[in-house]
Amino acid sequence: MLAYLDSSIVLRAVLPGPGRTAWRHWLDATAIQFDALVSSRLLRTEVVRVLRREQLPLVEGDTALSRIRLISVTGATFQVAESIEPNVRTLDALHLATALVVGRPLIVVTHDAMMTDVASSIGLCVFDPVRSDNTPLAIPGSVAGG
């Protein structure tokens, strides 16, 4: 099974803060638990844009992004994104469409409430690993199929 990560999770391992080390360890552990960590190529752009906005070196995103296999956004991905109902933000629709076109069992890992709701409504398995204190929660083995 694959773990599909969105920016609401990956940026926790990228941006400076007291939880960054815990989230980097979480990425390492999650990478071992799943066949692969995947996301849309869009994720790299989102990480770069946030790092630029925060005036941080782009190298801050390298460690996290190196653990994730980025999937190209194709014309077919855009068509799937356009068909997703209920309504969701454009970037979220592209993430969800990418998850749908992967063609392998996966779990969408996100802390975005709208993304969670829409992913669930279109039949994707979803997990939110963010505890109330913003520390990572391990994805249960039964959810990951192992």
Image (cartoon, rainbow, N blue to C red):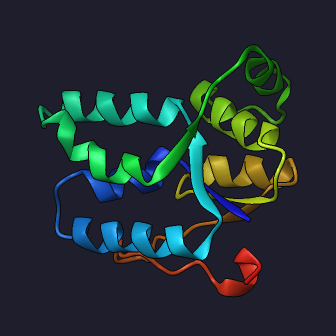
Quadrant location of the N terminus? bottom right
Residue at the (75%, 24%) spot, across then down: 77
Q: Nearer the viewer, residue 1 or 23?
A: 1
Please say if 31 is above or below 124: below
Q: Nearer the viewer, residue 96 or 113?
A: 96
Residue at the (68%, 60%) spot, across then down: 2
Q: Position of residue 22 (x, y in %)?
A: 29, 74
Answer with the quarter of the image where residue 123 lies.
bottom right
Quadrant location of the C terminus? bottom right
- Number of marks in the image? 0
Please say if 106 is above or below 137: above
Q: Position of residue 136 (x, y in %)?
A: 42, 75
Please say if 72 is above or below 12: above
Please say if 16 is above or below 59: below
In the visual, does 75 lie left or right of 70?
right
Q: Position of residue 43 (x, y in %)?
A: 47, 36
Q: Position of residue 62 (x, y in %)?
A: 28, 44
Answer with the quarter of the image where residue 105 lies.
bottom right
Q: Nearer the viewer, residue 109 or 134?
A: 109
Residue at the (20%, 34%) spot, across then down: 58
In the visual, does 59 lie left or right of 100?
left
Q: Nearer the viewer, residue 50 or 63?
A: 63
Residue at the (70%, 19%) spot, across then down: 74
